[in-house]
Amino acid sequence: MKKLLIIMLLPGMVFANGWAAGYTHLDIEGDTLGGLTGSYSWDVGDAWDLELGVIIGVNDTEIDGVKVELDPSLFVRTHYNVTEQFHIGLTYADFSATASYQGQSVSASGGETGLGIGGTFGNMTISFDTLEDTDMFSFQFHF
C-alpha cells in the first residue's frame, strides 16, 4: 500500500513548478555579495509552494582589507500566492562564507530566517527577502 501511495504522489513532486535559475544580491549589514542561484519548486497546496535552492557566490567583497567570498549556500522558501503574480513567504538560508587575509583563511556558516515578498511576471520572478542580518534581492527565470 505504501508503494502505491508513493507512486501516486511522485509525479506531483517531480513535475510540479520546476526549475529556476537566476542571480541573488546579498546585503549583509551594508556589505554586498552576489551569487548565481538554482532552485526547484513544488506546489504544496492551493496557494502554497515550496522552493529549495542553492546560491553559488560570484561577487566577492572586501571588508577592512579582508576578502570575503560566498561559498555554496542553501535556502528554502515557502510562498503563499496572494494572486498569480504576487506572493509573500518565509525564507530560511544557511549561508557559508570564507574570509581571507594575508594568506590565512577562515570559513564560517550560519542559518538565518526571515520574511519575503515577490512578484512573478511571465517566466521571471523578482523577490525581496529580509532575514536576520541579510537582505536578499533575487531575479529568477523559470524553465
Image (tube, rainbow, N blue to C red):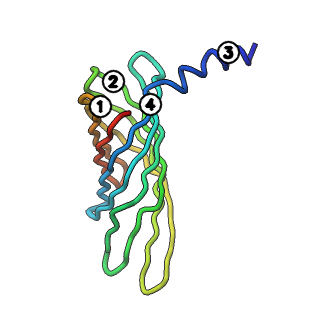
Foreground disc of the pair 3, 2: 3
**Quarter of the figure with the N terminus:** top right
Q: CA distance from mark 3 to mark 2?
A: 27 Å
Give the labeled residue for mark 3. Answer: 5
Identify the mark nearer the N-term, 3 or 4.
Answer: 3
Tag 3 and tag 4, C-beta contact below 8 Å: no
- Secondary structure, mark 3, is helix
Q: Name which residue type carries label 4.
A: Gly
Looking at the picture, how far across and down is residue 96, in whole percent?
Answer: 48, 60
Q: CA distance from mark 4 to mark 1?
A: 11 Å
**Quarter of the figure with the C terminus:** top left
Residue 134 is left or right of residue 74, and the answer is: left
Identify the mark nearer the N-term, 1 or 3.
Answer: 3
Q: Residues within 10 Å of mark 4 (few under 14, many from 20)?
A: some
Foreground disc of the pair 3, 4: 4
Foreground disc of the pair 2, 1: 1
- Residue 123: image tag: 1
Tag 2 and tag 1, C-beta contact below 8 Å: no
- Secondary structure, mark 1, is loop
- Secondary structure, mark 2, is strand
Looking at the picture, how far across and down is residue 91, in whole percent?
Answer: 41, 40
Foreground disc of the pair 1, 3: 1
Looking at the picture, how far across and down is residue 126, in whole percent?
Answer: 26, 39
- Residue 18: image tag: 4
Identify the mark nearer the N-term, 2 or 1.
Answer: 2
